[in-house]
Image (cartoon, rainbow, N blue to C red):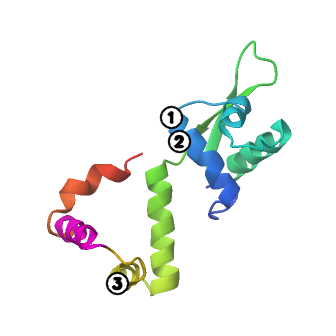
């Protein structure tokens, strides 16, 4: 990360989700088009893109023949960001204990028997769920 290794704000995460979903080089108009109503101003989206670039989440290039249009691409995958964020949650809230973190979510989420069975299956055969977070 360039500026710092801070987590994304809620709105920055929304912008990154749009970029990750589009899966390539995007401009502010591409993002604005996919924002929910009420849509932010173009300059607001451009500011978020600049901040994400400064934080090291994006890179950009200017398009020839497109005036001042910048095309942005992610430098961090959603899977990488998720992994880093969950490691931070584990460290900061559960003293680094995966067992404590897992226990917390099992208790707090009121899981159904089917969901518990699925979790047990993932624990017994972790390779089955590997591809689910590779966005």
Q: Which of marks 3 and 2 is in front?
A: 3
- C-alpha gap between disc 2 and disc 1: 5 Å
**In contact (CB < 8 Å): disc 2 and disc 1:** yes
Q: Split into 4 quadrants, where in the image is the N terminus?
A: bottom right
Figure quadrant of residue 72: top right
Q: Is residue 29 visible?
A: yes
Q: In the image shown, does 69 or 43 lie closer to the viewer?
A: 43
Q: Where is residue 103 in the image (x, y as percent from the top left)?
A: 34, 84
Q: Residue 23 carries which label?
A: 1
Magenta residue span: 112-122
Q: Where is residue 123 in the image (x, y as percent from the top left)?
A: 20, 69
The secondary structure that dominates the magenta segment is: helix
Q: Where is residue 109 in the image (x, y as percent from the top left)?
A: 41, 76
Q: Split into 4 quadrants, where in the image is the C terminus?
A: top left
Q: Residue 122 carries which label?
A: none
Residue that badge 2 annotates: 20
- Outermost residue, top side: 65
SS under mark 3 = helix
Residue 3, compared with residue 87, is above or below; it is above
Q: In the image shown, does 69 or 113 lie closer to the viewer?
A: 113
SS under mark 2 = helix
Q: Which of marks 3 and 1 is in front?
A: 3
In the image: residue 93, left or right of residue 118: right
**In contact (CB < 8 Å): disc 3 and disc 1:** no
In the image: residue 4, left or right of residue 87: right
The first of marks 3 and 1 along the sequence is 1
- C-alpha gap between disc 3 and disc 1: 34 Å
Residue 55, compared with residue 89, is above or below; it is above
Q: Which mark is residue 103?
A: 3
The first of marks 3 and 2 along the sequence is 2
């Amino acid at each position: 990360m360039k500026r710092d290794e801070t987590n994304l704000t809620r709105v920055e995460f929304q912008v990154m989700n749009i970029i990750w979903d589009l899966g390539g080089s995007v401009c502010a108009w591409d993002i604005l088009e996919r924002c929910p109503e009420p849509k932010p101003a173009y300059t607001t989206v451009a500011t978020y893109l600049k901040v994400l670039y400064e934080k090291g989440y994006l890179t950009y290039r200017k398009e020839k023949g497109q005036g001042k249009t910048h095309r942005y691409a992610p430098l961090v995958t959603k899977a990488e960001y998720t992994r880093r964020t969950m490691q931070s949650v584990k460290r900061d809230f559960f003293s680094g204990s995966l067992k404590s973190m897992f226990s917390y979510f099992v208790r707090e989420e009121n899981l159904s028997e089917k969901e518990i069975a699925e979790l047990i299956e993932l624990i017994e055969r972790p390779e089955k769920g590997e591809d689910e977070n590779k966005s």
